[in-house]
Image: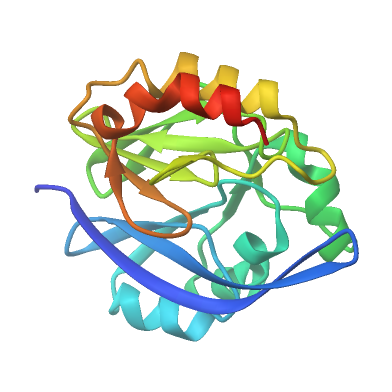
């Protein structure tokens, strides 16, 4: 079966370090007509359930531990029976929201996850957070979380983030992908590696 990608947009509050922001998050549902993985679980689980449309969910993959990407995760896991995956370097962010227990499994660079017959490879891309990851299908799609957006890297002006680290991650893990690769970000519009790569030096000069 060919890869099927659906998107659900959820709205809510991103809270970190005493600041709060209204945000819209992209939830990516990836697989086929029978089974899927869900990439990120933001705000309310009900719209995500609707987007799943009765398909079997084999995993909930969290690109990083910021609350606006995980705050619907336990409810979504309970509703679907699917396990939660998070990189261990973001466990401290998880614990701020859910100190009573952790995700089911840890993600590591190079892990391969079945998404309805298509294989997603985990790319550890720290910088926005220490445990930030992307998921690459090897055939033209990368799900970038908050590492790379249409217009540049994810924000690094918050605790646990680092600008030089995110630039290194983007340069080594994402800009090396084929230029036609579609970037499906955690917020905003899709882009391509080819559209973003020429701006690397601009981002560096701009800084945070």
103 relative to 124 in the view: left or right? right
Quadrant where the C terminus is found in the figure: top right
Counting the numbered discs, the total is 0
Q: Residue 85, position in %: x, y? A: 59, 47
Residue drawn at 17 percent across, 30 percent down: 180
Say whether residue 98 is visible.
Answer: no
Left-right relation of 30 to 73 = left
Image coords of residue 189 (percent x, y): 34, 57
Query: Between 3 and 165, which is closer to the camera in this rendering?
Result: 165
- In this view, 78 is above or below 7: below
Residue at image position (25%, 50%) is 116
Q: Residue at x 73, y 33 (%)?
A: 130
User: Can you say whether 83 is above or below 12 in the image?
Assistant: above
Frontmost residue, 114 versus 12: 12
- Above or below — where is 193 with respect to 149? above
Within the image, what quadrant is residue 126 found in? top right
Query: Residue 47 appears at what percent x and percent y?
Result: 43, 83
- 6 vs 120: above or below: below
């Amino acid at each position: 079966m060919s890869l099927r990608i659906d998107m659900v947009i959820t709205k809510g509050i991103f809270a970190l370090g005493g600041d709060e922001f209204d945000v819209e998050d992209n939830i990516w549902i990836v697989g086929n007509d029978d089974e899927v993985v869900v990439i990120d679980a933001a705000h309310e689980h009900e719209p995500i359930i609707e987007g799943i449309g009765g398909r079997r969910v084999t995993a909930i993959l969290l690109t990083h531990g910021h609350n606006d990407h995980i705050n619907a995760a336990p409810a979504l896991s309970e509703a679907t029976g699917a396990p939660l995956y998070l990189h261990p370097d973001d466990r401290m962010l998880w614990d701020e929201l859910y100190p009573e227990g952790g995700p089911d499994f840890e993600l590591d660079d190079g892990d391969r996850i079945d998404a309805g017959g298509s294989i997603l490879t985990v790319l550890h891309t720290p910088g926005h957070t220490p445990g930030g990851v992307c998921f690459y299908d090897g055939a033209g799609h990368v799900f970038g979380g908050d590492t790379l957006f249409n217009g540049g890297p994810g924000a690094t002006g918050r605790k646990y983030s680092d600008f030089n680290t995110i630039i290194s991650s983007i340069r080594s893990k994402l800009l090396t992908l084929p230029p036609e690769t579609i970037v499906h970000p955690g917020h905003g519009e899709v882009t391509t590696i080819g559209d973003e790569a020429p701006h690397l030096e601009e981002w560096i000069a701009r800084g945070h």
